[in-house]
Amino acid sequence: MIGAVGTDSIEIERIQRAVDRWGERFLNRMFRPEEIDYCRSRPRPYQHYGARFAAKEACMKCLGRGVWGGMGFREIETVRDEEGRPGLVLHGYAGEVFERSGATHLHLSLTHTETIATALVVMETRETGRPGKCLE
């Protein structure tokens, strides 16, 4: 059953401006080393940074915490499986919130154009019940 959904979009230009202004400081604050390495390996790294940033914000929304809910961006890691499908690995407080939520899985979809990146996160749960139950 679907327990929660989170979505986010970001203009790629915002990510590029942040990297231009803050450089490694911004990247290391927002992304885990593996995410940075992956994005740098791509022909258009800013689009990939944008998609991962959107995934982190969408995940925070899905977990009911939002950007100011106590989770760090680096606690939410975007990964790819053997077939290239995106997924999420949660660390620290984000992982604790997920465990307490009664959720069984997070599904991630990413897309981007030259100017916008979007992410959708769907939380799957075992239990049926009223929407938002996982946020208690």
Image (cartoon, rainbow, N blue to C red):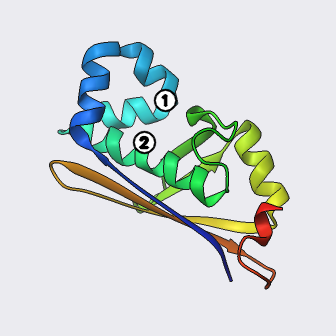
| Point 48% across, 33% down: residue | 34
Q: Residue at x 41, y 23 (%)?
A: 27
Which mark, by number, is residue 53? 2
The answer to which of marks 2 and 1 sits earlier in the sequence is: 1
Name which quarter of the figure residue 69 lies in.
top right
Neighbor class of circle 2 (other Cα within 10 Å; few <14, some 14-19, many 20+) is: many
The image quadrant of residue 100 is bottom right
Q: Quadrant of the N terminus?
A: bottom right
Q: Is residue 51 left or right of residue 81?
A: left
Q: Is 92 rendered above or below residue 79?
A: above
Which residue is pictured at 41% across the width and 63% down the height?
Answer: 83
Q: Which residue lies under the disc numbered 1?
A: 30
The answer for how far apart the CA atoms under marks 2 and 1 are is 8 Å
Image spot of residue 109 (x, y percent): 42, 64
Q: Can you see residue 41?
A: no
**Residue 124 at what x, y percent from top left?**
67, 73
Query: Do the CB atoms of the residues marked 2 and 1 lie less than 8 Å apart?
Result: yes
Taking the image as drawn, is residue 114 in sight?
yes
Amino acid type, label 2: Phe
Residue 72 or residue 88, whichever sits in front: 72
Q: Quadrant of residue 20?
A: top left
Question: Tag 1, which secondary structure?
Answer: helix
Q: Is residue 104 above or below residue 115?
A: below
